[in-house]
Amino acid sequence: MKRICLFAGFNINGIIEDYVLYYLQELSKISDIYYLADNKIMPKEFEKITPYVKGAYGYKHGKYDFGSWQELINKISWEKIAEYDELILTNDSVFGPLYDLQEFIESIEKDKEWDLCGINTAYDFHTWHLSSYFLVFRKNGFLSETFKEHINSIEKENSVKKVIEKYEIGLSKKMVEAGFNVKNAVKFRKNIYISWRSFFTAGSPLIKRKIFNDELFLICRTLNWESFFKKHTKYNTSFLYTYVNQFKSRFRIFRLINNKIFWQYAGKGIIKIIWTKERKLIRLFGIYLLNIYNYDSNKIKLVEY
C-alpha cells in the first residue's frame, strides 16, 4: 500500500518539538511525508526532520491546518498525489503514536468499504463529523471533485471556530452528502479530553495535546498521567513532561484567572444544556444528569474490523 501524508504544523517559537519529531519518525514507516508549518521554521529545525520527510516548508499563511494541507497539495500537485493509494492528513495537535501505527492502519484497512476514515466522531454545531487531527482517504475519496473543491475553497477565517465549522465539519458533511462511505475507527461515546485514558484503551493511537495545556490540565483528570503511560504504553513520557512543565509554575493560578478559555471551560462545568434531535444533555457542576446521543442520526459509521 502506497501512502502519502500531509502534515500540518504550528509552533509560535518556530521550532519542531521532540514529540513531533517522534510522530514524524513513526509516520515515515507507513507513508511518504510532506510537512508544512503555519509559521517560519529555523533552518536547524528542518535538519531534524530531514530523514523522515520528502519535503518540508514553514511560512505564515494564516489558514490553520486545512490551509497547510491546501498549500502542500498546491506544491505537490494532484497529479503526484494520484500516484498514491491512500492520503493521510494529520497535524501536531496530538501525542503519539501510543502503539504501533502500522498495526492501527492495517486494522482499519480490513474494512474495504470506507472512502474516508477518521479516529473518532465529534458532535459540534448540531452535527456529527470526523475529528480532523487524523484522517485517511482512499483514492476514490481524495481524487473526488468533492474533496478537491473543498480543499480549493479554503481561505483565511476570522476565528478557529469558523475554521472548524467550515472546513472540519464541512468536510465530513460534504463527503457524506456526496455519497461517500465515511467511517470512524474507535467506538467511543465519551469526551475524548475528559476521558482520554478510556479513549486510548478503546483503541486510539493518539491523544490530544490540548489535554495537557493551561486551559484543560486541571479539568481533564491528568493526575498520575505519567504512571498511566508507563503502565500501558512504551511512549516516551519525557515528550509530555517537557510540555507539561511549560505550564507548571507558582504563577499558574494567576494565568488561569486571566485566561478566557479556562473560564469558558469552567463555565461549561457549572451548567450546560443541549436539547436537540441528536443530543440531549443536562450537566450541573460537572455532574451529568442526562447525556443521551441519538446515534441513529450519525451517518458516520464504525469501521468493521
Image (cartoon, rainbow, N blue to C red):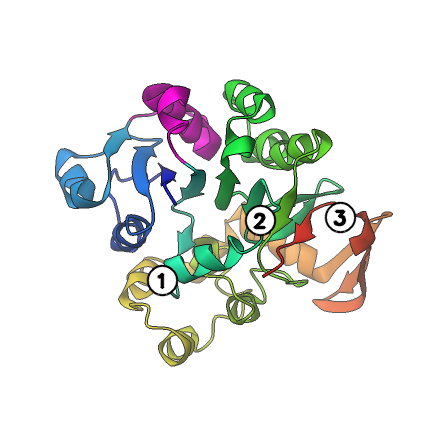
| Front-lying residue, 270 or 104 | 104
Q: Callout 3: few (<14), some (14-19), or many (20+) C-alpha neighbours within 10 Å?
A: some
Quadrant of the snapshot with the C terminus? bottom right
Q: Residue at x 47, y 54 (%)?
A: 210
Q: Residue at x 26, y 29 (%)?
A: 57
Residue 253 seen in render? yes
- Is 76 part of what is drawn in magenta? yes
Distance from the alpha carbon under mark 1 to that under mark 2: 40 Å
Q: The residue under label 2 is which amino acid type?
A: Lys
Vertical arrangement, residue 285 with respect to residue 167, above or below: below
Give the image quarter of residue 85. top left
The spot of residue 141 in percent (x, y) is 56, 33
Which residue position is annotated with label 1?
244
Distance from the alpha carbon under mark 3 to that under mark 2: 20 Å
The spot of residue 290 in percent (x, y) is 82, 65
Query: First in sequence: mark 3 or mark 2?
Result: 2
Q: Which mark is residue 35?
A: none
| Front-lying residue, 214 or 96 | 96
Which residue position is annotated with label 3?
298
Which residue position is annotated with label 2?
112
Secondary structure category for the residue under label 1: helix
**Chief secondary structure of the magenta portion:** helix
Q: Residue at x 64, y 37 (%)?
A: 172
Secondary structure category for the residue under label 3: loop
Query: First in sequence: mark 3 or mark 1?
Result: 1
| Front-lying residue, 216 or 79 | 79
Q: Callout 2: few (<14), some (14-19), or many (20+) C-alpha neighbours within 10 Å?
A: few
The spot of residue 213 in percent (x, y) is 44, 56
Q: Which residues are magenta?
A: 59-84
Query: First in sequence: mark 1 or mark 2?
Result: 2
Q: Residue at x 39, y 81 (%)?
A: 231
Q: The residue under label 3 is which amino acid type?
A: Asn
